[in-house]
């Protein structure tokens, strides 16, 4: 099926936590993993305790937990510091009546305060909702409204994007910044923190109680709230051990923002459940700054994304030689297909293999991966994590033989599987429409050696720079523009970003196509929704292809774009 299947890059001869993949897979038992948590002894569960306080109780309080760096700050926090700070914020939340089950959102650029807030929210048993800092008014409002959030932590700059008068449930906003003007519902974060005790009663919860709500996009409807519970920590811990290969003295850097699931499951939970030093870098991407982060912090494990690796490849080999990257032991990637040439390039230039990992917001943790002890087939996502059963099935649930393309599906359940889609049971059930399986929406095949190969999406979800974008959300914003009559949005293949967003637009009476109008429309989405959701390309059309029931046929738009046959047009309007 694929000429690449024969190529492998052997594992380096170093010891890893996993050891033999086949043995680990065959002998796997989740009960053994449970015994590594303190709840196994105490019966008391809270992920924030397991991630932070447990290490203090074990005498490791003075170890650096967080090294934060951006253009203006360079700070280190020990586990003891994070324990005290998150206790303080938990006390602040309590004093504003926030308790177990409440939804509390965090809308901030990466900063130590973001991580402290998130831990504090979990400590009171509330469900944390992280919002990517680039979100604009509509994106912020949709998520706060759907979740019924009662509180928000933000900064003075981002506060202006919160439409408070349209959000009746949102009672309290903690603003972290200088000289905050306190008023009804607006609280000065730093002033409250300064007054709060560093001791707190952690809210002990059940393993099935809510932990985090990540909004993500599908091909239809508004973004959906993917709800995860404390029990997910089993998967975060185990994959942190065998996929990230976290060991006591590691310095770990995950480049993802906590607004996305990689930035929480593997930017917060997995590293701290293992008590390792976690590097967080704020600010924009430049190859030099990123290599500097590895060099200065002596990063040993680096988890990033294909778009970043492609940009590094584009920046060339010479810049790599200007930095000392010898601390790196293990490199991983997630979020979009990892090109074989990128794996080969990384192997040559960094002298390390890049390990692809596959999973989704809905899965809460890594499911199909490459391991440091297993040969890599460049272009393949790897094999199922021990404890996970993956298969390629047809639309009737029949398991397909090797090398046949079909639905990538996972046997239910597993510890970090989403437990619901907030306010939307029908959407949740769609994923489980074939009994016993979770249907990912991705297509793939498995080769004779059990390696999985990504093929595409079955729906219209766009993946641009590893960020998942729902065409419906973009189209809804586009048609709010006075010039736009109708809009259809697709992902257009792009060598660096994987896909870019392209919008096809028909104009209202009285408007005529122009370059200025394209620019104005793109800006309208950028400022109303978010920069990463704005179309990079716009094409005006007199008419868009629609079904007789009036739905825009993105499939036909895509075929136009790629010069492919449009397929079955029997449902088209005329
Ligand atoms: O299509 C797959 C792609 O990203 C989707 C999940 O996006 P999101 O929920 O935002 O989570 C991203 C990070 C966990 C998947 O349905 N995807 C993710 N990892 C890979 C991938 N596509 C190819 N190869 C991967 N390793």
Image (cartoon, rainbow, N blue to C red):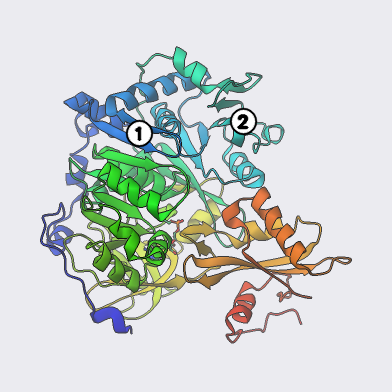
Q: Which mark is residue 172?
A: none
Q: Secondary structure at mark 1?
A: loop
Q: Is residue 269 visible?
A: yes
Dot 2 beta carbon under 8 Å from ligand 1: no
Q: Which residue appears farthest toward the right when viewing the image?
A: 510
Query: Which x, y percent locates residue 539?
Result: 70, 72
Q: Residue 269 or 323: which is nearer the viewer?
A: 323
Q: In the displayed structure, does residue 508 sit left or right of residue 4?
A: right
Sort mark 1 into few (<14), some (14-19) or many (20+) by Cα contacts within 10 Å: some
Residue in the picture at 36% in, 16% down: 198
Q: Quadrant of ligand 1?
A: bottom left
Q: Is residue 284 above or below residue 373?
A: above
Q: Is residue 45 above or below residue 187?
A: below
Query: Which x, y percent locates residue 45?
Result: 30, 31
Q: In the displayed structure, does residue 219 sit left or right of residue 524?
A: left
Residue at numbered disc 1:
206
Residue at numbered disc 2:
170
Query: Which x, y percent locates residue 574?
Result: 76, 82
Query: Which x, y percent locates residue 308?
Result: 41, 59
Q: Residue 462 or 393: which is nearer the viewer?
A: 462
Q: Quadrant of residue 566?
A: bottom right
Q: In the displayed structure, does residue 481 sit left or right of residue 397?
A: right
Q: Is residue 388 above or below residue 194?
A: below
């Amino acid at each position: 099926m694929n000429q690449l299947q024969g190529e492998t890059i052997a594992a380096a001869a170093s010891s890893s936590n996993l050891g033999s993949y086949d043995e680990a897979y065959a002998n796997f038992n989740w009960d053994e993993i449970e015994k590594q948590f303190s709840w196994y002894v105490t019966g008391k569960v809270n992920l924030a305790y397991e991630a932070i306080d447990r290490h203090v109780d074990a005498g490791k309080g003075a170890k650096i937990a967080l090294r934060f760096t951006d253009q203006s700050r360079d700070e280190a926090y020990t586990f003891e510091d994070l324990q005290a700070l998150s206790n303080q914020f938990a006390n602040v939340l309590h004093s504003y009546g926030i308790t177990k089950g409440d939804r509390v959102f965090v809308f901030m650029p990466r900063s130590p305060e973001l991580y402290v807030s998130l831990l504090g929210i979990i400590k009171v048993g509330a469900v944390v909702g992280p919002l990517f800092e680039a979100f604009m008014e509509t994106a912020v409002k949709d998520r706060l409204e759907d979740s019924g959030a009662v509180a928000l932590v933000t900064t003075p700059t981002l506060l202006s994007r919160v439409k408070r008068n349209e959000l009746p449930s949102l009672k309290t906003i903690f603003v972290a910044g200088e000289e905050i003007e306190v008023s009804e519902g607006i609280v000065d974060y730093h002033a409250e923190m300064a007054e709060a005790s560093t001791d707190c009663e952690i809210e002990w919860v059940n393993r099935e109680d809510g932990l985090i709500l990540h909004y993500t996009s599908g091909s239809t409807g508004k973004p959906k709230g993917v709800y995860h519970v404390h029990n997910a920590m089993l998967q975060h811990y185990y994959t942190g051990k065998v996929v990230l290969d976290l060991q006591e003295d590691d310095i770990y850097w995950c480049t993802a923002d906590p607004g996305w699931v990689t930035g929480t499951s593997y930017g917060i939970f997995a590293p701290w459940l293992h008590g390792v030093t976690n590097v967080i870098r704020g600010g924009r991407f430049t190859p030099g700054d990123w290599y500097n982060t590895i060099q200065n912090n002596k990063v040993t494990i680096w988890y990033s994304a294909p778009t970043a690796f492609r940009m590094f490849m584009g920046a060339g080999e010479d810049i790599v030689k200007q930095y000392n990257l010898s601390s790196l032991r293990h490199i991983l990637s997630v979020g979009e297909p990892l090109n074989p040439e990128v794996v080969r390039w990384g192997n040559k230039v960094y002298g390390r293999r890049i390990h692809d990992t596959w999973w989704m917001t809905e899965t809460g943790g890594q499911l199909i991966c490459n391991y440091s002890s297993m040969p890599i087939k460049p272009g393949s996502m790897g094999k199922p994590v021990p404890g996970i059963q993956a298969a390629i099935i047809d639309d009737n649930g029949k398991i397909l033989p090797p090398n046949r393309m079909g639905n990538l599906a996972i046997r239910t359940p597993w510890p970090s599987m989403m437990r619901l889609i907030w306010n939307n049971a029908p959407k949740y059930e769609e994923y489980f429409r074939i009994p016993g399986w979770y249907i990912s929406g991705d297509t793939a095949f498995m080769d004779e050696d059990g390696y999985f190969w990504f093929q595409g999406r079955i729906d219209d979800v766009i993946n641009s720079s590893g960020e998942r974008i729902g065409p419906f959300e973009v189209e809804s914003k586009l048609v709010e523009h006075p010039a736009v009559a109708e809009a259809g949005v697709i992902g257009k293949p792009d060598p660096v970003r994987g896909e870019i967003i392209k919008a096809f637009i028909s104009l209202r009476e009285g408007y005529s196509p122009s370059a200025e109008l394209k620019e104005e429309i793109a800006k309208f989405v950028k400022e109303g929704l978010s920069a990463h959701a704005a179309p990079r390309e716009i094409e005006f059309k007199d008419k868009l292809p629609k079904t007789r029931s009036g739905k825009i046929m993105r499939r036909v738009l895509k075929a136009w774009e790629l010069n492919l046959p449009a397929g079955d047009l029997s449902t088209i309007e005329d």
